[in-house]
Image: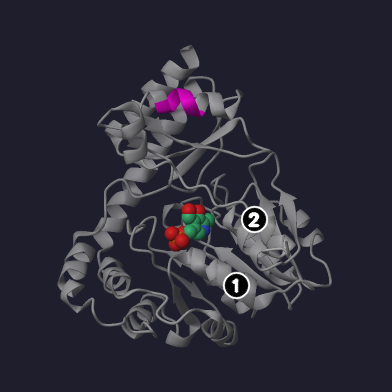
Amino acid sequence: MSRLVPPYIERLVPYVPGKPVEELERELGIKNALKLASNENPMGPSPRALEAIAKHLPETHRYPDAAAFRLRERLAAHHDIAMDEIIVGNGSNEIIDNLCRTFADATNHAVIGVPSFVYYKLGLIAANVPYTEVPLRDHLAWDVTALLAAVRPETSILFVAHPNNPTGAHVAKKDLERLMKELPERVVLVMDEAYVEFADAPDFVSALTMRNLRERLLVLRTFSKAYGLAAIRVGYGIGPRAVIDYLNRVRAPFNCNALAQVAAIAALSDHEHVSNYVKLNRTERARVTNALTKLGLKVGPSQANFVLVNFAKPGKEVYDSMLRLGVIIRPMPAPIDTWQRITIGLPEENDRLIAAVQQTLGA
Ligand SMILES: Cc1ncc(COP(=O)(O)O)c(C=O)c1O
């Protein structure tokens, strides 16, 4: 039989999401499973977003605004930039996919980190773009020297998650400055700031503050994390007009649905909702880190709404033990397969997490 797909599609392995709560509850016959696996906002969505969605529901027979005019207008005001420097997407995942298809082909090359957000690799494989995975220092910290050294004459795209998923690491301001300046001009630098709201290190700055240092910079943001709208699927990218223009040519029409557009506009104005969560995350991230460290575990320093924890035991064993206790965490692939990524929850959820870890370690 003739081949069904090209060889690079054959290499693709589907993205494995965090296990859904209902699935575990069905499997264990329990009612109160706790999911700390997908870095979602444990406080829920903004009530203003819910109101906006409800108000828009009678209009769902109409196509959305394909240009997402009102959302881009609102985002432009929020970031003090021009509307045509913004692209919105069906989650930032869609924009990652489109970046791979737009700025590279099989003759180009991309640079990504490992461990880092796995979707960069999937997007690159699906677009048949060769790539180099650059190890983080001790699996945890970004290594700008190594990233720059991996760049080849044909490199056209470099992805940095900032803070990183799953390590929570950021690039210190002076290293970020160096990356911006030393990365060859032709490369599109993608700074994925999905977790930016949670970062509070003194040497953390958003790449948006360095737009003057290089032309080809695309900063990604999402409403899935701090804004609590993961289900509605909306993310955006900020970059120079030329980059946004090409992304607009590649994206599907109506890629950002109407409910997502109105929800994002409403969520953007709910500063209190985001700041309450950020405050809670800061306190609880420190508390969970301390508690797990006291239990003898190594916890990576995190600038995000999760922590990466080394159990020094086969990941599946730990994951399964936690599942039996009704707590869903996220096992990690090699080379960090003894580590688990754990989302910071509400205080009572974190108490339950710590107790389950204690039980797992005692087992
Ligand atoms: C670093 C990073 N970028 C992007 C995303 C995708 O977010 P979205 O829900 O906007 O597609 C995630 C989701 O986990 C992420 O961790």
Question: What is the magenta range?
Answer: 319-323
Outermost residue toward the right in this view: 153
Q: How many marks?
A: 2
- The quarter of the picture where residue 3 lies is bottom right
* Nearest to the observer: residue 223 or residue 98: 98
Q: Which is closer to the viewer, label 1 or label 2?
A: 2
Label 1 vs 2, first from the N-terminus: 2
Q: Amino acid at mark 2?
A: Leu
Residue 356 is inside the magenta segment: no
Q: Position of residue 19 (x, y in %)?
A: 42, 41
Kindly identify which numbered label has been placed on residue 12.
Answer: 2
Residue 282, relative to residue 65: is it above or below? Answer: above
Say which element carries label 1: helix
Q: Position of residue 353 (x, y in %)?
A: 38, 28
Picture residue at 54% right of the left edge, 82% below the top: 244
Residue 241, relative to residue 220: is it above or below? Answer: below
Q: Amino acid at mark 1?
A: Leu
Q: Is residue 362 left or right of residue 52?
A: right
- Measure how far apart labels 1 and 2 are at the Cα level: 18 Å
Kindly identify which numbered label has been placed on residue 304.
Answer: none
Residue 320 is inside the magenta segment: yes
Q: Position of residue 242 (x, y in %)?
A: 59, 87
| Residue linked to disc 1 | 99
Q: Is residue 74 left or right of residue 53?
A: right
Q: Position of residue 145 (x, y in %)?
A: 77, 56
